[in-house]
Image (cartoon, helix red, strand yellow):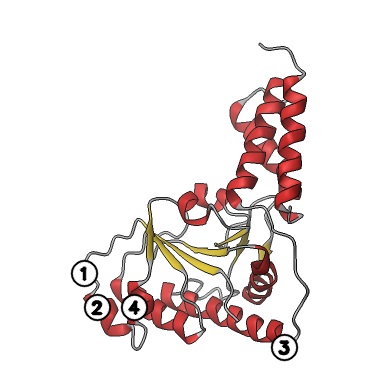
Amino acid sequence: MVLPVRFVLMRPRNAENLGAAARALKNCGLSDWVWVRPEVEDLEPARRLAVHAQDVLEAARRADSLEEAVSDCVWVVGTSSRKVDGKRRLPPRAVGEELVARAPQGPVALVFGDERSGLTNAEVERVHDLSAVPTAPEQPSINLAQAVLLYAYEVRVAMLEAAATPAGPLPAAATDAELAQVEATLENVLTAGGFLVDAQPGRTAVRDLFAPLRRSRLTRKEARLWLAALHSVRKRWPAG
C-alpha cells in the first residue's frame, strides 16, 4: 500500500542528516519528501549515509516556501514542542495513525524545522496541528534524522495495521490551499462587516474561529460551499 504521506524538511543544513533521513524513509516504504530552501551544497556526505537509498535521496523535491510544499495537502502537522491555542498536540503514534487515516482523501504532510532552531513562529501558526516526541527533560532535543525515522516508523506501523483492516472509500478532502482560501474569505467578510478592527487581534480571532473547521476535516465539496456562502453574504453588503 502506497499512501501520499509527505515529509517536509525546512531549511535542512546537514548533509549527513539528509542521507540518514533518506535511508530511514526507504526503511519504512516512504519516498515523498520535500526540502524547503535547503542550505546544503555538497551532497556527497549524504550519499555515503543513504545506504541503498540513493534513489530516495536524489528524488527529493525542492520548494521555496512551506506553502508551496504543502498546498495540495489535506492535513499538515508540524513537529514542535510549542503550545498554540486551537491546535492539537499529538504524540507520534497518533500522528502516524491519523496521517494514514487521512491519506486516502489526499496528500498529508509532516513538517520538520531546521537543525538549529526548528520551525519558526510563522510556520507553527501555518500548520494545522502539532506533534512532539515525549523525550526526557534532561535531553529534550532529537537529531533531525532520528526524528524522521521515528515518525516514519509510526507511519509504517499504521500503514500495516490499515492494510490488515481496509476501510471504505472516503470523499475528497479540502486541500491546504483551499482551506487557506476559505479562511482568507472569512477574514474579508468579517472585516467588511465590522467584526474585525485591529489587525493582529483580528487575525488571531479569525484563526480561532476557523480552527474548528480545520479540525472537522472539511471535504472539497464542503469547502466550496463555505466559499460560495461567504461570497454571497459579502455581495449583499454595500461597498465601502
Q: CA distance from mark 1 to mark 2?
A: 7 Å
Sequence-wise first label, 4 or 1: 4
* Residue for point 77% across, 54% down: 216
Alpha-carbon neighbours of circle 2 within 10 Å: few (<14), some, or many (≥20)?
some
Sequence-wise first label, 4 or 3: 4
135 left or right of 235 in image? left
Q: CA distance from mark 4 to mark 3?
A: 31 Å
Q: Secondary structure at mark 1?
A: loop
Q: Quadrant of the N terminus?
A: bottom right
Q: What percent of the width, then of the height, locates residue 230?
A: 74, 32
- Please state which amino acid type lies under the numbered disc 3: Ala
Among the 4 quarters of the image, the one containing residue 205: top right
* Residue for point 21% across, 69% down: 42
Q: CA distance from mark 3 to mark 2?
A: 38 Å
Sequence-wise first label, 3 or 2: 2
The residue beneath circle 1 is 42
The residue beneath circle 4 is 19
The residue beneath circle 2 is 45
Alpha-carbon neighbours of circle 3 within 10 Å: few (<14), some, or many (≥20)?
few
Nearer the observer, 91 or 174: 174
* Residue for point 69% across, 34% down: 186
Q: What percent of the width, then of the height, locates residue 90?
A: 67, 67
Q: Secondary structure at mark 4?
A: helix
Alpha-carbon neighbours of circle 1 within 10 Å: few (<14), some, or many (≥20)?
few
- Please state which amino acid type lies under the numbered disc 1: Asp
Task: Kindly check if marks 4 and 2 are in contact, taking CB atoms under 8 A apart as contact.
Answer: yes
Q: CA distance from mark 4 to mark 2?
A: 7 Å
Q: Secondary structure at mark 2?
A: helix
The residue beneath circle 3 is 164
Mark nearest the camera among 1 and 3 is: 3
Q: What percent of the width, then of the height, locates residue 223?
A: 71, 45
Sequence-wise first label, 4 or 2: 4
